[in-house]
Amino acid sequence: MSESRITVAEFETLVEEAAPFAADYDFRVESIERGRAAVRLPASDRHLRPGGTVSGPAMMALADFTMYAVTLSEVGRVPLAVTTSLNINFLRRPRPGDVVARGRSLKAGRRLVVIEVDVFSEGMDEPVAHVTGTYSVPPGDSETE
Amino acid sequence: MSESRITVAEFETLVEEAAPFAADYDFRVESIERGRAAVRLPASDRHLRPGGTVSGPAMMALADFTMYAVTLSEVGRVPLAVTTSLNINFLRRPRPGDVVARGRSLKAGRRLVVIEVDVFSEGMDEPVAHVTGTYSVPPGDSETE
Amino acid sequence: MSESRITVAEFETLVEEAAPFAADYDFRVESIERGRAAVRLPASDRHLRPGGTVSGPAMMALADFTMYAVTLSEVGRVPLAVTTSLNINFLRRPRPGDVVARGRSLKAGRRLVVIEVDVFSEGMDEPVAHVTGTYSVPPGDSETE
Amino acid sequence: MSESRITVAEFETLVEEAAPFAADYDFRVESIERGRAAVRLPASDRHLRPGGTVSGPAMMALADFTMYAVTLSEVGRVPLAVTTSLNINFLRRPRPGDVVARGRSLKAGRRLVVIEVDVFSEGMDEPVAHVTGTYSVPPGDSETE
């Protein structure tokens, strides 16, 4: 188990530059380890459906952001790593309140990182959504090799 | 070829009530026919990556919204139709400017509607993203039957 | 944690009738619990790529079969439960030899069961493939309700 | 519109060496053009469900094989191109008889080819399954560059 190739602070700085739209969501990076990341989406009127639960698009944005953190934990500071595919299953309606995404890499290759993310609603044991996706790492840019 | 079960005006009214977060994106519904819908995401600083191109999460939100319009064109005014799954492939970097999603139903069953969406960047012939997804229609609520 | 709604023996009998093509693969059901199943694909010349490793289509067939077992563990003897979608990520080349799929339900609804499957190559710690999929349970046929 | 980088005859020779398990299915390559391929799965007792319709795993194998043909039409004779992901939606029950898959590339990059496949049942206008997937082309092996 090696160390993450990016710290939470480095990741947050990079995101401000490379993905400023993320600020809209007020994502809170809770932890990054090698191959793992946890990110919180605080409850906010901005992203709610009627009934006070988080919208599907907000969960997809959260999952994609978490996948980015997991990818950089494997390959280091590569701002141009991009999502090539994302598959989400919505499992159950979240409760009102924060949601937290927990991602882990299924495979960290030189060119592709495959990530799995479970999205949890605070106070529920079972995930509200399950996501898999792939990030592509530009050649020559990775710090893995 | 039968008529759409919802008009653009009816759809817009429903969205204001059922999915107010969509207002954040300023989606413009260009057309709804039975089994088809086109929705535009106007260029806006809000959803841009550095370089002025639309972010991945904004494209996923646009695709999901377009799938919702296609679903309601098949089943009528069913606000509680929900996404059960969405799969997106990001194909090429969009150009700066608007993006337009064109969706069509692959299958409109009583309980599940399966939809395909191509996302285009204005001025490009080839799609920037390809999406498939499934909406679930609550039992007893559909106006299809 | 309730009991599986189908036993290994009942599942094997049902498969002989409802999915005879499965016999081609010589799948061995190792265990079925409520919401979980493990199925082995024995190494065989039939399903190998050059180099002696299991082919992609054989792994997809194995994953689909495992999803079927997980579904019936939740809803009981419903032969007409059918796959509505399947998403697979191939992660690494299997080793020569048997592969084993381990599935678990992410959600067991009345109409849809969502399942996750990891496929392992004997002697490797990390999965060779990761699968998610959905089975649809025909209305009125489920023993869940 | 440039020419296919592989002919039907070259593809069939390559498959005999690189994917001998495909012979089990008796796939018939009907056509290969640059970025497109059509492949037929003849009706056979081997791959049928009760009722005489083609099984899900047989359709997945057919789609994967068609994706391989589309990929090689873009990159040429690269036996080690491999599936990295495949997503299938089963739309309607096929009729008894042959099924035909029609694939086309959505993106042909140097490292990844993204393909869409519609699977048709002979005598039906609407597809029985819709598939998207990605093939990875090993670096240095592609004839595209």
Image (cartoon, coloured by chain):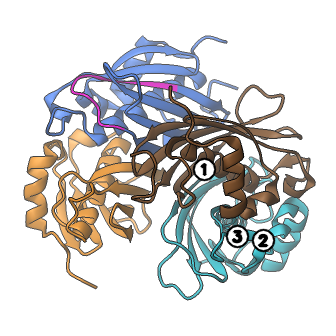
Chain colours: A blue, B orange, C brown, D cyan
Q: Position of residue D35 (x, y in %)?
A: 62, 71
Q: Amino acid at mark 1?
A: Tyr
Q: Which residues are magenta?
A: A92-103
Q: Secondary structure at mark 3?
A: helix
Instruction: Give, as a three-letter code, the residue at label 3.
Output: Ser
Determine if marks 3 and 2 fall on one subunit: yes
Element on which disc 1 rests: helix
Q: Which residue is mark 2?
A: D46
Q: Position of residue C45 (x, y in %)?
A: 92, 54
The C terminus of chain B - image quarter: bottom left
Marks 3 and 2, how far apart at CA: 29 Å
Q: Earlier in the sequence, mark 3 or mark 2?
A: 2
- Residue A141 in the figure: left or right of residue B22: right
Q: Nearer the viewer, mark 3 or mark 1?
A: 1
Name the foreground residue: B83 vs D93.
D93
**Subunit ID for the residue under disc 1:** C
Give C23 or C64, whichever is nearer the viewer.
C23
The residue drawn where x is 57% and y is 58% is C79
Left or right of residue A135: residue B13: left
